[in-house]
Amino acid sequence: MTTADTTASPPDLPALARQARWQVIKAVTGAKAGHIGGPLSMMDLLVSLYFTELNIRVEEPEWPDRDRFVLSKGHAAIGLYSVLALRGFLPVSELSTFDKADSRLQGHPDVTRLPGLDSSTGSLGQGLSVGVGMALGAQLAKKDFHTWVMLGDGEIQEGMVWEAVQLAARYKLSNLTAIVDRNGLQQFGLPSTSETTGTDRGDRRDPWFGVDLSAVFQAFGWRVIELNGHDFDQIHNSYQLARAGDFNGRPTVLIAHTVKGKGLSLAEGAHTWHSIVPSPDDFEKARQELEPDEIELLDSYAHAQQRSQV
Amino acid sequence: MRAMRDVWGEKLVQLGDTDPRTVVVDGDLANSTKADNFAKAHPDRFVQIGIAEQNLIGTAAGLAAVGCVPWTSSFTVFLTHRALDPIRMLVAQSHANVKIAGSYSGLLIGAVGKTHLDIQDLAIMRAMPGMTVLAPADEHELLSMMDWAQAMTGPVYLRLVRDVVPDVFDSSYVFEPGAIHVLRPGSDVALVSTGPQTSRVLAASDQLAAEGVHAAVVHVPSLKPLDTQALRMALQGSQLVVTVEEHSVHGGLGGLVAEELSSGSSRPRIERIGVADGWGESASNEFMLDKHGLSPDRICDRVRSLLATAVSR
């Protein structure tokens, strides 16, 4: 299903994910702004999507029949930019312009600036509606591209998400897949009152404590697949199932259990790394864990440019 | 002279006939807005979002992103207020090719009360960079605007009213974005209006003329973009400019005219007729027009009073 160079060997997904995570740390440190926890938790899902699943053309970003991808959790933009760079949509060196004046790489994705983006996002909870429109449009035009939407488990507290959930089921959008990056930590969270009142509200930072999210989606008429969002085989299999579609026409949601800050030991499971500029010490530690060997960092963008000129 | 919603509903069908990209997204109000015409004619391209206006706008943006030309069908207040953030991010900031038709704008929508009246839509939509903001005076202007909106790529907000509105133009009318229309010359006062309010301003101008007061009438159908140079030229030499709109006096046409004239060399006295800082209420159209100074008689009263104070100064 992919238009990736078929003569090349299969992509080394763990290595690419590590590279992308390192680009996130570098860009956020350079910009002195941005998010880390969320981009890192979704990274294995995103790298798998872009390198093995999405039907896209790097040399023709606006190809009308391409799969669509919406990063509804737009604050994880630098994660997407890093993957787009490694995939060849922009030079890796451009990641250093993240969040800076005149950059195509705005703090949240801006569809008017960067080819390869399919939607602007940032104000949370709106991306699934866009995905619903894209999937509906595909059905109207009798096109077989698939639409993918990455949602944060925090952002799906927004009511608009559930408006879209209803409509996707009603219109049997089996060509739509939502991925929930279920890292279980939101920025600040609900107050936990157990110390003062004895009322157990659980982990204050889990946006869905006490709620069976799978059952909720199922009750709304969606096909639900739960997976470990860091297991590349499970991710691959889930994507295949999602694309194949549900025989009842249900849209698919992949509830991907992830670890916020995954891949950087300092950040894993630490809500404090939601949005942070690493200290020089932490940056060095990240370098030791994540920095790829020189030889690993292929210039995919230059290759894509060459291909588009052929 | 027809109900604007009927004209809109029938024109949608025609756009659907001639352009297969046309899609209507409805918020369960198609039988009110008259988009039900389209639902009957093109059922496969009529999307019933249900009572979920944020999702209505988001879905429209997604449809536009894959090549459709979506037109919204809902009451304007639920779009410009409830779905304001999706309009901001997914339509205006994204320059999405979504045509936001705000039905039941203004004061004259029957006994529904302040919850359903939208008298801030022009202020809200005008503040959006990249948005085109249009308020047609009659069916001819509406039809031409719809053709124009369908043909261009980008977001458009169209202010529609429910009821029958008298003709101001005829079938030869061709809409041009930004253009203003000087419908009457006059040197004593310049009356500036938009939407169907213009027909009531013309009636007031006729009454004033019978008394020997020469009132210019300037119609501004395109609040954004606007040919500001043409507006200044049209109002040049007027000592008194009175804006008249079925909208709040804050941020709409009156605000626009005040903003534009404040930076020019000619600075006439500007008075704004419209809804003062308040909401609407359940009442008849006649009551509403009278209460807020928008009927021809009340416009004349206000102009006479303003001219009298101008003389006494």
Image: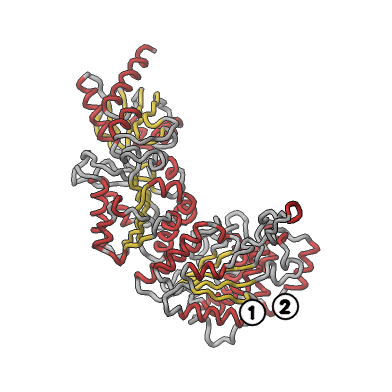
Taking the spot 53% from the left edge, 67% from the top edge, the residue there is A216
Classify residue B272 by image quadrant. Answer: top left
10 Å crowding of disc 1: few (<14), some (14-19), many (20+): some
- Could you say which disc has been placed on residue A231 in the image? 1
Q: Closer to the camera, A175 or A9? A: A175
Label 1 marks which chain's residue? A
- Could you say which disc has been placed on residue A293 in the image? 2
A235 versus A210 height, above or below: below
Q: Same chain for marks 2 and 1?
A: yes
Taking the spot 57% from the left edge, 81% from the top edge, the residue there is A236
Q: Is residue B70 left or right of residue A242?
A: left
Q: Closer to the camera, B102 or B78? A: B78
Q: Is residue A3 left or right of residue A45?
A: left
- Tally of marks: 2
Q: Is residue A104 visible?
A: no
Give how far across and how far down residue A25 sits, in percent.
70, 65
Q: Closer to the camera, A121 or B130? A: A121
Q: What amino acid is labelled 1 in the image?
A: Asp
Q: Is residue A124 left or right of residue A260?
A: left
Classify residue B121 by image quadrant. Answer: top left
Q: What amino acid is labelled 2 in the image?
A: Asp
Label 2 marks which chain's residue? A
Q: Identify the mark nearer the N-term, 2 or 1.
A: 1
Which of discs 2 and 1 lies nearer the camera? The answer is 1
Classify residue A155 by image quadrant. Answer: bottom right
